Image (tube, coloured by chain):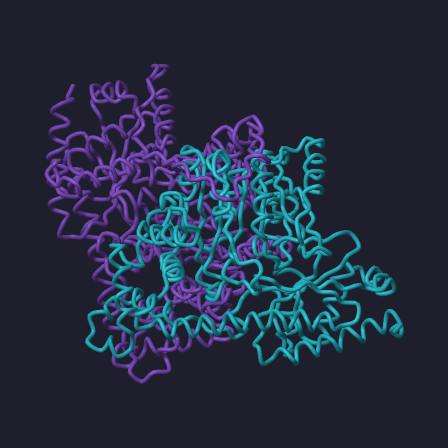
Chain colours: A purple, B cyan
């Protein structure tokens, strides 16, 4: 049971329907943890010596756990997904029982779970690094391409003792960080240092680390885009801080206006919040917009003037689908404005989970940190060291992503074919789904310029909103549930990401395989048309 | 000039309070010296492969194949990989439709959690529920998640053994809780003293602390002691009586170097004791692929198992796990192979057994060598390393050495360890990093340097120590 999603839905309904009381949503059943059957009391029965437990709540119960844990929410794997999993189990038991053959998980940016193939060269190198004994065998050349073997050697040589199973330096293997820094420098045209890089188990732990550092109490605020990827809201809640929302402008292609940033900053300050940082997700999640250079410059200046740390989530930097936009890292923008390492505290996040590589399960990523004092760096290092290090295979993959095959390498052509194939397919799917959504009555959908999602807006008839209210769920959650039950398609209600109150959206990934897209579109259309017929005012 | 948000003064106080000596001052100094060209023997962290221990082949073969599934279609694959590794790779790939590259279930791949449950059942004789087993990026992540769930504010206290592995003190600091120390009795082989523990709890309560949980590390780190069944029973009864959740760090369960006290899990003892305790006592048990004979620290594979936690609490723990999406899949596969290794009759069984046995027996010999070596040194007393991977000798520093340390602005054991490092290149962790009784000093080292290097290392230590003692104490009163 994912009660937290129901709680959020309840609050959203209450807020948007001005005091209309709502009945609690019936939570989807969670299989209860089986109580252990009574075991025969062993020879060591200590009945005589045992006294009854101290009265009071058991130490780890809902009443006694950290309230910040209770407060945080993460809809991407929330209630609708649990419901989908239950339906999937039903389908397995009884294939004819539902109006669809399979569940289509469009809730999560998890490309390889939907059939995207990994990059062959990357996997060859990783496989060799997993089992370096292979490098000594001549037969290896029959199975692996020679530049992959060469690259694996180079990587192993960078690892002290060639021990891929050892804890590395807490920031990650130095040689790999240097390689990543070189890749960043090539990308941006500005110097980067391996000492500023912290390799982490995916980008998410790095975000958590920064929130931990920046937040001391609920008086500490972090500016976050609405809609946002709910890692941010969850992490801020978990660390006891305050989320200061700034609204992206849906009418202007989800544009980010610095005036809006200023407005929200002032308002927060007037309430006694110390705003510490600005989160910018570029390309955006769930919104997919790619920021224009001019826009980025204004954002950098805003942070500089108002003394905010810029937290630049750039994990979708290689997912751009429009010709008139390009990815520019915030570091590059800051440097091009003349700001040096010391002038502006900037943290840039990258991951191996997205792009054309989509290696979510590997948990690889890093943050590049510039613009803060040695004392603060020491603290970050200290926190990183408690967990000792991130997984080494993920570190290796991050170095491959930031330093892929070059022209002239044996694997370059096949690598480029794989890469371009995936990226062009993503672009086509983004377009096809966007057009499909826009063709439907009551749905408008901004273009996905980048990332992996569409975030269509539902202009729901009043009757539908009423039905949702009666069911005790938010209208977008209601829609998503009906969609799932009719078609097997799993999307995440917009309330999971935040939206302008009174507007409804859902997030749908563009990740199902291309040959499935027409069927998905037609199933969706059929459902939506019926839904509108049912609820049209 | 306005304060900048990432100015040192503006940082979260809890972060600043954290101490984690394992990669602290000594380690940083050792790294500096290494850069200058000095040969350093890193014994500061339980990191076997860094000191030459070889990975167990089977696990690496399986993961290498899962990493590059296209190999499985290649006609040559049988030349390079044994049939059972190939079969096992296919077995794990079948469990995860997206292969290694997809986020798994946030709790870990169900099929592997089932394998872990089977392992626990076989080990303890009691079945367990895979739904209550969560795989994590190393056991440390699991410990941190559970502590974060328990700790609400600075009035929540966690009973932690002293000396302890500083993950506990660091995490408690980070989450704003209070560490309630219980001292292990060095003279009695690092045993628990419940009279002392009860006093400690009473004292904490009188200061307004709500003691919520008790941590045991079995086998102990840094102390190496293996708890007896009677010990564990006492712990369980105590927790039951005092309404504490028991956090059983059992990551060294495969590293046992004596025969009197084999490993017995807290869970097994709990179920042996039967109801009502077995039905009510809340327990979380931790394990990892980083230790044992595997030593696969860099993979970040671990799990925690929950017993008697209410379903709603489990939901909340699940929710927090889902924010980080999933533990790394290769690490999960290492966990699968570790707890479900090759069996008699499998092609890889002989090699696997030989490799594991070699590691285990060598560790056992080194545990003995190190203990005896330390005990042969002047003013050094060392309990036997019954389990885990460390030696924690007590260094009886003469008063003049303590004064010298004070003048140098260092804690006495830090002073000693720095001098040891500069003289011999041996990088240890001062006992203050783990906690110790006032005025009693230790260092922690590992038993992990290569066996053939041991005689030289121990004699190098002895030479340094005995001359240090001579310097600060004068001639030995023999």
| Residue at the bottom extreme of this rendering | A138
| Residue at the top extreme of this rendering | A20
Residue located 47% across and 30% down the image = A62
Q: Quadrant of residue A139?
A: bottom left
Q: Is residue A93 above or below residue A531?
A: below
- Which sits in the foreground, A189 or B346? B346
- Answer with left or right where residue B284 lies relative to residue B20: left
Q: Position of residue B460 (x, y in %)?
A: 70, 78
Q: Position of residue B427 (x, y in %)?
A: 65, 69
Q: Quadrant of residue B387?
A: bottom right
The quadrant in which the N terminus of chain B is found is top right
- Answer with left or right where residue B179 lies relative to residue B472: left
Is residue A491 in view? yes
Is residue A262 in view? no
Q: How many marks?
A: 0
- Answer with left or right where residue B393 lies relative to residue A490: right
Q: Is residue A172 above or below residue A533?
A: below
Q: Position of residue A89 (x, y in %)?
A: 22, 41
The quadrant in which the C terminus of chain B is found is bottom right
| Residue at the front extreme of this rendering | A43
- Which sits in the foreground, B167 or B248? B248
Residue located 36% across and 58% down the image = B336
Q: Quadrant of residue A285?
A: top left
Q: Position of residue B68 (x, y in %)?
A: 28, 67
Q: Is residue B333 above or below residue A46?
A: below
Residue located 50% across and 69% down the image = B360
- Answer with left or right where residue A292 lies relative to residue A86: right
Q: Is residue B343 above or below residue A207?
A: below
């Amino acid at each position: 049971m994912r009660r937290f999603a129901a709680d959020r839905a309840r609050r959203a309904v209450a807020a948007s329907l001005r005091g209309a009381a709502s009945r609690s949503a019936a939570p989807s059943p969670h299989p209860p943890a089986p109580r252990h059957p009574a075991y025969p009391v062993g020879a060591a029965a200590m009945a005589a010596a045992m006294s009854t437990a101290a009265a009071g709540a058991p130490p780890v119960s809902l009443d006694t756990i950290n309230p910040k844990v209770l407060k945080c929410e993460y809809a991407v794997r929330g209630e609708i997904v649990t419901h989908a999993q239950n339906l999937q189990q039903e389908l397995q038991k009884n294939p004819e029982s539902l109006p669809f053959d399979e569940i289509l998980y469009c809730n999560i940016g998890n490309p390889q779970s939907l059939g995207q193939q990994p990059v062959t060269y990357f996997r060859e190198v990783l496989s060799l690094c997993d089992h370096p004994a292979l490098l000594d065998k001549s037969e290896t050349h029959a199975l692996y391409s020679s530049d992959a073997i060469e690259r694996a050697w180079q990587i192993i040589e960078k690892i002290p003792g060639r021990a891929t199973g050892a804890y590395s330096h807490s920031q990650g293997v130095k040689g790999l960080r240097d390689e990543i820094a070189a890749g960043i420098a090539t990308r941006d045209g500005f110097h980067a240092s391996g000492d500023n890089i912290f390799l982490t188990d995916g980008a998410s732990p790095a975000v958590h680390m920064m929130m931990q550092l920046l937040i001391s109490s609920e008086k500490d605020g972090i500016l976050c885009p609405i809609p946002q990827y709910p890692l941010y809201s969850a992490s801020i809640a978990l660390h006891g801080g305050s989320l200061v929302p700034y609204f992206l402008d849906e009418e202007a292609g989800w544009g980010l206006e610095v005036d809006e940033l200023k407005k929200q900053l002032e308002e927060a300050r007037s309430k006694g919040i110390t705003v510490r940082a600005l989160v910018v997700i570029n390309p955006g999640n769930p919104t997919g917009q790619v920021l224009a250079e001019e826009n980025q410059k204004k954002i950098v200046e805003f942070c500089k003037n108002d003394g905010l740390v810029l937290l630049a989530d750039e994990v979708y930097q290689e997912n751009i689908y429009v010709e008139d936009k390009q990815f520019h890292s915030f570091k590059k923008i800051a440097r091009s404005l003349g700001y040096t390492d010391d002038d502006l505290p900037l943290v840039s996040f990258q991951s191996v989970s997205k792009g054309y590589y989509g290696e979510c399960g590997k948990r690889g990523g890093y943050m590049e940190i510039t613009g803060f004092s040695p004392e603060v760096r020491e603290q970050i290092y200290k926190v990183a060291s408690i967990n000792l290090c991130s997984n080494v295979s993920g570190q290796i993959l991050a170095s491959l992503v930031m330093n892929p095959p070059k022209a002239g390498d044996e694997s370059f052509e096949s690598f480029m074919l794989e890469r371009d194939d995936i990226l062009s397919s993503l672009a086509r799917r983004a377009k096809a789904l966007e057009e499909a959504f826009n063709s439907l009555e009551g749905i408008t959908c901004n273009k996905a310029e980048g990332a992996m999602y569409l975030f269509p807006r539902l202009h729901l008839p009043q009757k539908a909103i009423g039905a949702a209210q009666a069911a005790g769920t938010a209208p977008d959650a209601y829609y998503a549930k009906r969609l799932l039950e009719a078609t097997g398609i799993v999307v995440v209600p917009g309330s999971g990401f935040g939206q302008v109150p009174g507007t409804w959206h859902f997030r749908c990934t563009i990740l199902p395989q291309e040959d499935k897209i027409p069927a998905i579109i037609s199933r969706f259309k059929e459902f939506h048309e019926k839904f509108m017929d049912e609820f049209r005012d | 000039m306005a304060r900048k948000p990432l100015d040192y003064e503006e940082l979260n106080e809890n972060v600043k309070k954290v101490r984690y000596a394992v990669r602290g001052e000594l380690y940083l100094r050792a790294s500096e010296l290494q850069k200058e060209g000095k040969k350093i023997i890193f014994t500061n962290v339980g990191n076997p492969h860094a000191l030459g221990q070889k990975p167990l082949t089977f696990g690496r073969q399986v993961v290498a194949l899962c990493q590059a599934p296209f190999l499985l279609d290649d006609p040559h694959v049988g030349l390079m990989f044994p049939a059972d590794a190939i079969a096992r790779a296919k077995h794990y790939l079948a469990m995860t439709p997206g292969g290694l590259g997809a986020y798994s279930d946030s709790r870990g791949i169900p099929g592997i959690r089932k394998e872990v449950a089977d392992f626990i059942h076989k080990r303890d004789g009691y079945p367990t529920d895979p739904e209550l087993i969560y795989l994590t990026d190393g056991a440390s992540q699991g410990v941190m998640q559970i502590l974060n769930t328990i700790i609400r504010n600075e009035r929540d206290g966690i009973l932690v053994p002293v000396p302890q592995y500083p993950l506990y003190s660091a995490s408690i600091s980070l989450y704003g809780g209070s560490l309630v120390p219980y001292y292990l009795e060095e003279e009695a082989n690092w045993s628990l003293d419940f009279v002392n523990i009860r006093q400690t709890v009473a004292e904490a309560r009188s200061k307004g602390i709500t003691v919520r949980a008790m941590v045991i590390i079995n086998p102990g780190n840094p102390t190496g002691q293996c708890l007896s069944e009677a010990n564990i029973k006492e712990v369980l009864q105590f927790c039951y009586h005092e309404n504490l959740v028991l956090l059983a760090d059992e990551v060294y369960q495969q590293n046992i170097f004596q025969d009197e006290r084999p490993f017995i899990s807290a869970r097994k003892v709990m179920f042996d004791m039967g109801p009502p305790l077995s039905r009510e006592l809340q327990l979380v048990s931790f394990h990892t692929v980083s230790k044992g004979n595997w030593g696969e620290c860099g993979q970040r594979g671990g799990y925690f198992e929950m017993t008697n936690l209410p379903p709603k609490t489990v939901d909340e723990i699940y929710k927090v796990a889902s924010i980080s999406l999933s533990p790394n899949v290769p690490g999960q596969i290492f966990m699968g192979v570790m707890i479900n290794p090759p069996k008699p009759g499998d092609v890889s069984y002989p090699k696997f057994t030989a490799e594991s046995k070699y590691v285990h027996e060598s560790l056992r010999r080194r545990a003995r060598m190190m203990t005896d070596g330390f005990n042969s040194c002047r003013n050094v007393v060392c309990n036997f390393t019954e389990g885990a991977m460390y030696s924690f000798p007590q260094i009886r520093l003469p008063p003049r050495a303590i004064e010298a340390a004070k003048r140098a602005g260092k804690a006495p054991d830090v002073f000693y360890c720095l001098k040891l490092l500069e003289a011999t290149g041996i990088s240890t962790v001062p006992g203050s990093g783990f906690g110790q009784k006032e005025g009693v000093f230790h260092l922690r080292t590992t038993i992990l340097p290569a066996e053939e290097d041991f005689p030289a290392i121990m004699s190098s230590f002895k030479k340094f120590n005995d001359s240090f003692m001579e310097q600060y104490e004068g001639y030995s009163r023999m």
